[in-house]
């Protein structure tokens, strides 16, 4: 779907993502996450910054499985992640952007040697959200997480997903063979459901 042919669900998703300057979105698997972010970049009217910690999106582009979107600026941070986020903070504070962070799991993996990784990541997200407010930008960070009794947890590493005040919490869920974007309240009850079959996530 070309970004000039925005579907009803694309309009609703864009509106939801830009409701807050910071949003979290969880997925059942990394492939669906990558395709969703790719499609979101295609239907978003503002410039998109894609921060690819997982390298799955970059790999799909290199293998020509997904096509490069001229609206998307791609970063693949590793040791230089501090410099990358410093650049992004400046960009999103002066012009409206959508920042896609793919993913929280990958960001934690990058900081696996640091015992302060949780605090560092929280600080980075708060800083990005603060910068985003200045130009009405939006930051959306993805993860593959599971809902436990004490909240959403990243499998394998056991880290809880950041929950910051005034943050959207979203989940892509499949029900009866239909993919839905679900907006959740702070107690994980459902606030809004947007069917997204017309985004063609295949």
Image: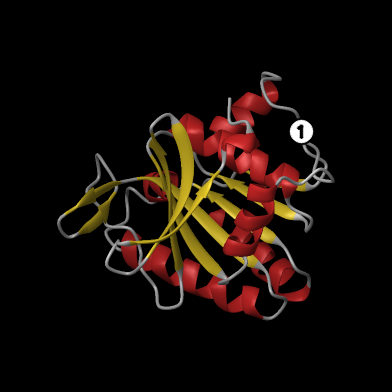
- Residue drawn at point x = 67 percent, y = 69 percent: 137
Residue 125 located left or right of residue 48:
left
- Residue drawn at point x = 60 percent, y = 26 percent: 59
Q: Nearer the viewer, residue 153 or 159?
A: 153
> Callout 1: 10 Å neighbours few (<14), some, many (20+)?
some
Q: Is residue 182 above or below residue 3?
A: below
Location of mark 1 (residue) = 68
Q: Nearer the viewer, residue 201 or 59?
A: 201
Q: Nearer the viewer, residue 21 or 81?
A: 21
- Residue drawn at point x = 43 percent, y = 71 percent: 123
Residue 44 located left or right of residue 32:
right
The percent position of residue 76, horizontal first and vertical second, equals 60, 43
Residue 59 located left or right of residue 125:
right
The percent position of residue 132, horizontal first and vertical second, equals 64, 73
- Residue drawn at point x = 23 percent, y = 59 percent: 151
Q: Is residue 131 above or below residue 173?
A: below
Q: Is residue 167 above or below residue 182?
A: below
**Quadrant including the N terminus:** top right
Q: Quadrant of residue 118?
A: bottom left
Q: Is residue 80 visible?
A: no
The percent position of residue 91, horizontal first and vertical second, equals 74, 67
**Quadrant including the C terminus:** top right
Residue closest to the far front:
176
Q: Is residue 2 above or below residue 81?
A: above
Element type at mark 1:
loop
Q: Quadrant of residue 64?
A: top right
Q: Is residue 126 visible?
A: yes
């Amino acid at each position: 779907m070309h970004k000039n042919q925005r579907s009803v669900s694309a309009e609703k998703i864009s509106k939801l993502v830009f409701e807050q300057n910071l949003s979290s979105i969880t997925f059942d698997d990394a492939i669906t996450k990558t395709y969703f972010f790719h499609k979101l970049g295609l239907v978003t009217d503002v410039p998109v910054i894609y921060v690819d910690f997982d390298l799955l999106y970059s790999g799909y582009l290199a293998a020509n499985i997904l096509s490069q979107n001229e609206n998307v600026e791609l970063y693949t941070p590793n040791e230089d992640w501090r410099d990358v986020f410093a650049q992004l903070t400046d960009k999103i504070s002066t012009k409206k952007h959508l920042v896609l962070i793919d993913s929280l799991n990958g960001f934690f993996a990058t900081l696996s040697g640091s015992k302060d990784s949780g605090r560092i990541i929280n600080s980075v997200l708060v800083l990005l959200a603060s910068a985003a407010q200045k130009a009405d930008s939006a930051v959306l960070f993805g993860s593959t997480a599971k809902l436990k009794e004490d909240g959403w947890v990243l499998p394998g590493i056991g880290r809880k997903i950041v929950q910051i005040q005034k943050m959207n919490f979203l989940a892509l869920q499949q029900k009866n063979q239909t993919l839905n974007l679900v907006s959740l309240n702070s107690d994980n009850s459902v606030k809004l459901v947007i069917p997204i079959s017309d985004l063609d996530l295949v």
